[in-house]
Each structure stands twice: as structure tokens, then as C-alpha cells.
Amino acid sequence: MENVEFDEKASKNMHILSKAVYIITKIVTIICYIGVAFIALGLIIIPILLGHVDTKNSTFKVGGKEYSYKIDDKKLTVYDGAKEVVSEKIDIDIDLNEMIEKHPSSYYIGVAETVLGLGAVSIILVILFLKHLSKLFKNIGEDETPFTEENIFHLRKMALFLIIGVIFAVISDCLFSAIAGYNMRLNFSFSDILYILIILCASYVFSYGLKLEKPKKVSTKK
């Protein structure tokens, strides 16, 4: 096999693009941390808000003030006495009136807390994936070669967190369906499997590249 000559221009472009991806992953990671913080806040606030909802009389209290609500034709309307204060369309395929009247507010607190908890775990998995992605591109942007043991490790960790994410998505959909009492479409796509296979293939390509790099380094030392 012929030795490939070092291409300074290609190496420079690789480093620039890698640093750009690294910066983007860091920004997305910060956004994810903010999302987790909002979810944590929601876990505290929701029991306080929903704890004052009377599902039988279609009323709730905020700051000691009582409001009434009405759900009609997938539209939520909130009233302060006779005055309409909120009017929002609700685009979901379930009968909200029947669902709300069937259970007390404590049930909906449990559902909301479950949804937020599952959402928090999903975001944490994304953060762990991005952690290895950012380290991978940081290394590629700084090192002479991308073919290192550390980069192979990051690729395999990324594939692992994607696998966990796919399994968790299916489990969380089943769990939420059981708690909420209606069937949900499973959050599963064959494209997820494709992404996992691509990352695993990339790890083997990097591993092969590392094996090709080692004889070159030995001959350079001689």
C-alpha cells in the first residue's frame, strides 16, 4: 500500500470544520442543560398548580383566585368570572372532557410528573451523547490525525447512548400509555438504527485507520 502524502490544506479544512461542530455541540449542550433546569422547575410547580384544580366543577385556583375552564371541540377556554382570559386550540386525538372528568387532579399530577421525568431522562441521554460528540470533534480539530484510541472510544460511547435512547423511547411510550390509559404510537424509527450502524461503522473505520497509522509512526521513529 502506498503512503499517502500529507495534505496541509485538507488538514486545515478538517480542523476548521471540526472546531465549528465542537462549538455547535457545546451550544446545543447548554440549551439541553437549560431544558433540564426548566423540567426540574416544572416538577416543583405542577403539583402546586394542579393541586388546586377541581375536575368535577371545572375550576382551579391560582394565587387564591378561582378560575373556571371549558373544553369544547379541542379548544381550551379559561374564564375569570364571565371574562374570557385564555383561548387555545388543543391538537390531540383524545376526548379531553371525558378524560378530565374520569380522574381527580392527583392523577394528572402523576401523569405530568411522569412525562416531565421521562423528558428529563431523554435530555440527559442527549447531553451524554453530545459530551462524547464534542470531545470527538475537539480531538479531531486539535490532533494531527483523527485515528486515535480515544476517538474510537467516543464513537462507541455515542453508539451506546443512541441504543439506550432508542430502547428508552419505546419503554417510556409504553409506560406513559399504561399510566395515561390510552395507546400511543411507539416512538421508534428505523432511521435510529441506521444512525447507530453508521456510528459503529465509523468506529471500525477509525480503528482500521489507527492500525495503518502505527507502522507509519514506527518507520518515522527509525
Image: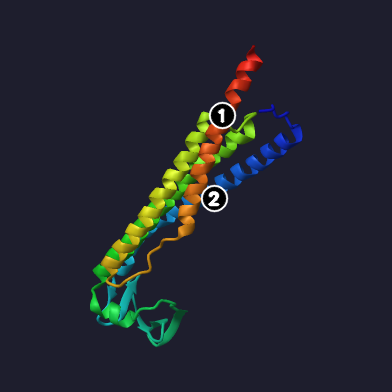
Q: Residues within 10 Å of mark 1 (few under 14, many from 20)?
A: some
Query: Which image quadrant: the N terminus?
Result: top right
Amino acid type at mark 2: Val
Q: Residue at x 71, y 39 (%)?
A: 13
Q: Find residue 106 and name its label.
A: none
Residue that badge 1 annotates: 210
Label 2: few (<14), some (14–19) or many (≥20) C-alpha neighbours in 10 Å? some
Q: Residue at x 35, y 59 (%)?
A: 170
Q: Residue at x 48, y 48 (%)?
A: 197
Nearer to the camera, 45 or 103: 103
For the residue marked with disc 1, what is the amino acid?
Leu
Residue 146 visible in the displayed image: yes
| Viewer-nearest residue: 147 or 54 | 147
- Residue 189 position in % (x across, y down): 45, 60
In this image, 77 relative to 216: left or right? left
Residue tagged by mark 2? 28
**Relative to 23, does residue 123 appear above or below in the rendering?**
below
CA gap between label 1 and label 2 equals: 30 Å
